[in-house]
């Protein structure tokens, strides 16, 4: 199981040769019908610009391989299933709407999708343009975070975490609360990560986490 996750995380050449042509096709296409619940929470075209939902990432622009890998990880419950966020969405976003969430958390949602549906969703969101979150950042703390990034993260999250082709998700320009939460999950072993990444995250102090989040948030406007 974890071999598959590791394989998906480190295939930039395959992304270039296979995923980019598919992404071009998806860009011209309408969002798949199965994307409707995703759009309600992650925003139009997968871009979350709502500061009231700052624990939800923008998924537009991430590589198709990365997004398909997240479906697999959710299916295996190898990262938190976001049940509380789904509960909040049901009570706030979908209240009074004709639409309802098709599952009670991310893990069940991923398991309810066929491989073909997952592939189409990944291709669609990968083809959309990433837009950084509109949020203030602390230059001093961001500078500290940049030093932590260079020591621990730069090899897999190049250019300030802004490259989709790293196949490691886009970090630059994401909401700070989302980044902090995910970094804590990695440190605590609650979210799947390759062994080489565990070495880098297990010793992160809370100050490091806050500084890294500030750094990645500050890179959005610089790199997109």
Image (tube, rainbow, N blue to C red):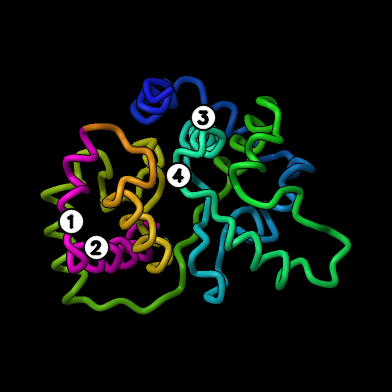
Circle 1 — which element?
loop
Q: Which residues are magenta?
A: 196-224
Q: Are the residues flagged by discs 1 and 2 in contact, CB closer than 8 Å?
A: yes
Q: In terms of image quadrants, where is residue 163? A: top left
How far apart in space, not on screen, are marks 1 and 2 (Cα)? 7 Å
Q: Is residue 125 above or below residue 75?
A: below
User: Whole-percent x and y of residue 14?
Assistant: 42, 20
Q: Earlier in the sequence, mark 2 or mark 3?
A: 3
Q: Which residue is mark 2?
A: 209
- Label 2 or label 3, whichever lies nearer to me, is 2
Q: Earlier in the sequence, mark 1 or mark 2?
A: 1
User: Whole-percent x and y of residue 16?
Assistant: 43, 26
Which residue is drawn at the image coordinates 71% and 73% (left, top)? 92
Q: Which mark is residue 20?
A: 3
Q: Which residue is mark 4?
A: 79
How far apart in space, not on screen, are marks 3 and 1 (Cα)? 34 Å
How far apart in space, not on screen, are marks 2 and 3 (Cα)? 32 Å
Circle 4 — which element?
loop
């Amino acid at each position: 199981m974890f071999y598959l996750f590791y394989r998906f995380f480190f295939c930039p050449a395959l992304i270039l040769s296979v995923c980019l042509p598919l992404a071009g096709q998806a860009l011209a296409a309408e969002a798949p019908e199965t994307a409707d619940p995703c759009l309600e929470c992650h925003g139009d075209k997968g871009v979350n610009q709502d500061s009231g939902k700052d624990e939800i990432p923008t998924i537009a622009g991430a590589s198709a391989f990365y997004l398909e890998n997240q479906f697999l990880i959710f299916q295996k419950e190898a990262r938190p299933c976001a049940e509380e966020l789904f509960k909040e969405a049901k009570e706030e976003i979908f209240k009074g709407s004709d639409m309802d969430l098709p599952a009670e958390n991310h893990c069940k949602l991923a398991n309810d999708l066929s491989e073909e549906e997952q592939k189409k969703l990944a291709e669609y969101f990968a083809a959309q343009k990433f837009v950084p979150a509109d949020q203030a950042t602390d230059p001093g703390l961001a500078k500290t975070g940049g030093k932590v990034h260079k020591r621990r993260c730069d090899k897999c999250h190049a250019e300030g975490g802004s490259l989709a082709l790293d196949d490691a998700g886009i970090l630059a320009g994401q909401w700070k609360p989302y980044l902090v939460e995910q970094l804590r999950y990695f440190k605590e072993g609650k979210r799947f990560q390759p062994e080489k990444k565990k070495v880098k995250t297990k010793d992160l102090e809370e100050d490091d986490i806050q500084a890294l989040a500030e750094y990645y948030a500050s890179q959005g406007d610089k790199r997109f």
